[in-house]
Amino acid sequence: MALTVVILAAGQGKRMRSNRPKVLAPLAGAPLLAHVLRAARQLDPAGLSVVVGHGGGAVRAAFSDSDVNWVEQTEQLGTGHAVLQAMPVIPDDHQVLILCGDVPLVRSETLAQLVAAGGPDQLGLLTARVDNPAGYGRIIRQENGNVRGIVEQVDASPAELAIDEINSGLMVLPGKHLRRWLSGLGNDNAQGEYYLTDCIAMAFSEQMTVLGIQAPAEQVLGINDKAQLARVERLYQRAQAEALMAAGVTLADPARVDIRGTLSCAADVFIDVGAVFEGTVELGEGVHVGAHAVLRNATLGADTVVHPFTLLDDVHTGQACEIGPFARLRPGAQFADRVKVGNFVEIKNSQIGPGSKVNHLSYVGDTTIGRQANVGAGTITCNYDGANKHRTTIGDGAFIGSGVQLVAPVDIGAGATIGAGSTISKNAPADKLTVERSRQLTVEGWQRPAKKPPQK
């Protein structure tokens, strides 16, 4: 049977105490809904619908480039009512997989098992056993192990409340029967809502088989408040850390690394505590990432060292580079092999050639630096005139003294030396010393002003 996926994402999430729709709450740097969509797409469904309600415009805007069918639930009247809004575009001969936009850890392989449990006259229901089932609907099973029904906590008897197997809210149902069951739902319950879970009892009454597929409890955790969001974040990060270590990465502390995107590592990579990886990051063989470094959309060549408290944003390096500590590399920074950038250095939109150094307290923007050049402490490339950006070129083997200002556009020739404290606004010739300084003057007889006594 063909598959249509329906993701329920209409809830307001009042317990989140946020003006943002709950499904846009961030998990590992991406909205909750993004994680659910990723798992759903891996099933290659024929159709994919997302039901939105509270803050639906913000949700659609966050996924404006997505190929989903957006469905509006103008009144939040329960999960059954939400699915009903999506049914007009779902063919009768499809299986319908129901997912929840606030259950982000479910894996695609688990969903594949759930889909396999469904059929033209058979349902699949994802369940889990948990230590504390409070707040979840309880699974009622027959003697043969098949599911007979689900009872919501507010409607459960004391005996039913003692059941530790819970409904995840994820299920697969045949489209033809689902359409009929939804039209027959009632709201005679404590919440006054139309429960999708009542379709399970309807299927049982029609002698259809309902298979309960048990998943690990972590995969079906729903998020209703910030404490649950934080717990799921740590579970997600721990799984990422375990995968890295299984691939040979050394983590100083698996509990203190955050991956908010995609991180790929070659052999013998070391990551110290507190490191954060965002976007797409690739680390070559033997790369060492120091404590509390932040790497965003970065590619680092083999044996590169990133010292602690360094920020790399859209950076590409060659091999055996050394960066930081306390350096900031902004978009467009590209390093050849063996480049060294030291403490409190900022680099933006610049290319630095093999073996060149910018060691201390400098700003280099819109600059091309050749091979084996040295940029001294406190050097600034003055690349912005208040309206336009201009480039600086520093040739192979050039030596820039400390405290120099290079006023772009300007070219420093190969092998040139720029004296410390100079302000260079004209091209400096190759292999020569260029100095621009005011004459030093000592004023005889000058006295420093004295502080006046306070007035009475």
Image (cartoon, helix red, strand yellow):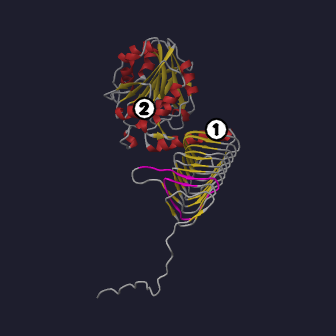
Residue 243: numbered disc: 1
- In the image, farthest residue toward the left: 456
Provide the secondary structure element on which disc 2 rests: loop
Whole-percent x, y for residue 450 in the image: 40, 85
User: Does 185 appear above or below 361?
Assistant: above
Which residues are drawn in magenta? Answer: 388-412
Amino acid type, mark 2: Phe
* Gap between marks 1 and 2 measured at Cα: 28 Å
In this view, the residue in front, 265 or 434, is 434
Q: Which quadrant holds the C terminus?
A: bottom left
Whole-percent x, y for residue 366 in the image: 51, 50
Q: Quadrant of residue 154?
A: top left
Badge 1 vs badge 2, beta-carbon distance below 8 Å? no
Whole-percent x, y for residue 184 in the image: 36, 16
Whole-percent x, y for residue 35 in the image: 50, 33
Q: Earlier in the sequence, mark 1 or mark 2?
A: 2
